[in-house]
């Protein structure tokens, strides 16, 4: 069969693209990429960051483009939840808190105030008294301030987001291939051949590549070009909570927090029940463009083997120690039952914005999630679907220059 569009990459952005394409008439679409493994082992080639129940989604942001992506995506969750019968978005609110005088907290405050005023949303000022009244179990830094807003803020089950997009897409006729794509070549007739790991191949008129941190490893791009991406091994620590702590912290929002001026930012997910029946509070660290990693947090990754080994490791003691120290400072009266370290890989761009665009006619790439593809994925998928069908950028709300695809050789 000759497909109209082949989407390569079955993570957040790729699955969302397939979902939106499935709503368009008279299109033969396929989605290529393996599903979530039962456990991570090094005999598997490809992994994803969507194997999780809790990822922050927020319109509280220092970047207006991020606010638009998150806002538009959040507006789409109810329809996808109805179509799939899966719960995706939980609106617990979002707080950004840090010490007075921090420039980045100032940026969050200014852009959030402006956006909430424009959209008619409630945004509350946060200080030590506010925290004591609302979240007495949380011990903040001295002279802290920030913002809290509930509407359109909270967390998503990114696992359910991917499941929902794929299930609805398949119901709407999208063909699913669970193999790893091993290469893409352009044929003499102008169509594309997608080689699969089982030796089979797919033919398609148009291509969307959305393979996250694996984009540069499988000769997927025309001319074997490499995207200008920095791959970072990322760690999070999930703290299992007992029933008493879960009840006590039931009103906890998602949070970005900076404990002092010279410290790194961390993000915190409220208590979330996972498929194993346990409830976890999750802590990770905020990664910014051109961030220089400390050894206790993670490491830059260069090769396919580096990425595979990072996903499959069982422990990272320095990160475990770092997050446990922060947990104790923030929640001194909460004793976790256990901790569980988890690993993923971030694909960072120098601009801090996602890459979405055509690398040649009929060949679109979406990459560089910058650790934010979960909350932006549904809207990025819509941009990809609309644009690949139209043959050019198709999103009036955003400027394509902000999402320009850039290569290692400096070309754009």
Image (cartoon, grey):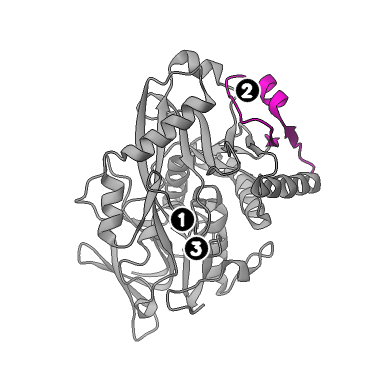
Residue 354, x across and y down, in percent: 53, 61
Question: Could you give the CA–CA distance between mark 2 and mark 3, rounded to whole angstroms?
Answer: 35 Å
Question: Could you give the CA–CA distance between mark 1 and mark 2, rounded to whole angstroms?
Answer: 32 Å
Q: Are marks 3 and 1 in contact (CB under 8 Å)?
A: no
Bin the neighbour count of mark 3 within 10 Å (Cα to Cα): few under 14, some 14-19, many 20 and up.
many
The residue nearer to you, when weighing 138 against 3, is 138
Residue topped by disc 2: 135
Q: Please, is residue 398 above or below residue 128 in the view?
A: below
Q: Secondary structure at mark 2?
A: loop
Residue span colored magenta: 120-149
Residue topped by disc 1: 292
Residue at 51%, 27% in the rendered image: 329
Q: Which mark is residue 349?
A: 3
Residue at 36%, 67% in the rendered image: 216
Residue at 67%, 49% in the rendered image: 103
Mark closest to the chain's N terminus, 2 or 3: 2
Is residue 134 within the magenta segment? yes
Residue 205, x across and y down, in percent: 42, 74
- Could one spot residue 412 in this view of the protein? yes
């Amino acid at each position: 069969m000759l497909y109209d569009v082949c989407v390569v990459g079955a993570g957040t952005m790729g699955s969302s693209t397939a979902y939106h394409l499935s709503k368009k008439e008279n299109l033969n679409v396929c989605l290529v990429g393996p599903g979530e493994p039962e456990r991570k082992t090094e005999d598997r080639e490809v992994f994803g960051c969507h194997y999780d129940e809790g990822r922050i989604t927020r319109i509280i942001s220092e970047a207006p483009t991020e606010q638009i992506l998150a806002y538009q995506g959040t507006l789409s969750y109810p329809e996808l939840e109805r179509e799939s019968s899966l719960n995706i978005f939980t609106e617990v609110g979002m707080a950004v808190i840090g010490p007075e005088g921090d420039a980045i907290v100032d940026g969050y405050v200014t852009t959030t105030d402006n956006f909430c005023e424009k959209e008619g949303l409630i945004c509350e000022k946060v200080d030590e008294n506010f925290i004591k009244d609302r979240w007495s179990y949380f011990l903040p830094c001295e002279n802290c301030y920030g913002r809290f807003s509930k509407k359109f803020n909270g967390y998503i089950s990114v696992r359910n987001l991917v499941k929902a997009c794929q299930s609805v897409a398949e119901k709407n006729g999208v063909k699913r291939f669970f193999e790893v794509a091993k290469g893409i070549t352009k044929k003499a007739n102008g169509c594309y051949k997608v080689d699969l790991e089982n030796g089979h191949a797919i033919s398609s008129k148009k291509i969307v590549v959305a393979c996250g941190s694996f984009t540069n490893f499988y000769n997927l791009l025309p001319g074997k070009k490499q995207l200008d991406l920095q791959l970072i091994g990322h760690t999070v620590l999930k703290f299992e909570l007992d029933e008493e702590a879960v009840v006590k912290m039931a009103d906890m929002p998602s949070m970005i927090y900076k404990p002092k001026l010279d410290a790194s930012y961390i993000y915190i997910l409220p208590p979330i029940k996972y498929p194993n029946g346990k409830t976890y509070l999750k802590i990770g660290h905020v990664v910014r463009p051109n961030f220089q990693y400390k050894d206790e947090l993670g490491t830059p990754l260069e090769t396919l083997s580096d990425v595979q080994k990072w996903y499959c490791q069982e422990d990272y003691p320095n990160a475990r120690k770092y997050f446990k120290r922060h947990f104790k400072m923030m929640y001194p009266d909460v004793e976790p039952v256990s901790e569980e370290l988890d690993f993923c890989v971030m694909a960072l761009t120098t601009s801090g914005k996602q890459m979405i665009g055509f690398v040649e006619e009929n060949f679109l790439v979406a990459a560089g999630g910058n650790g934010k593809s979960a909350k932006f994925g549904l809207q990025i998928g819509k941009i990809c679907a609309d644009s690949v069908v139209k043959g050019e950028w198709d999103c009036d709300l955003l400027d394509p220059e902000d999402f320009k695809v850039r290569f290692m050789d400096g070309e754009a």
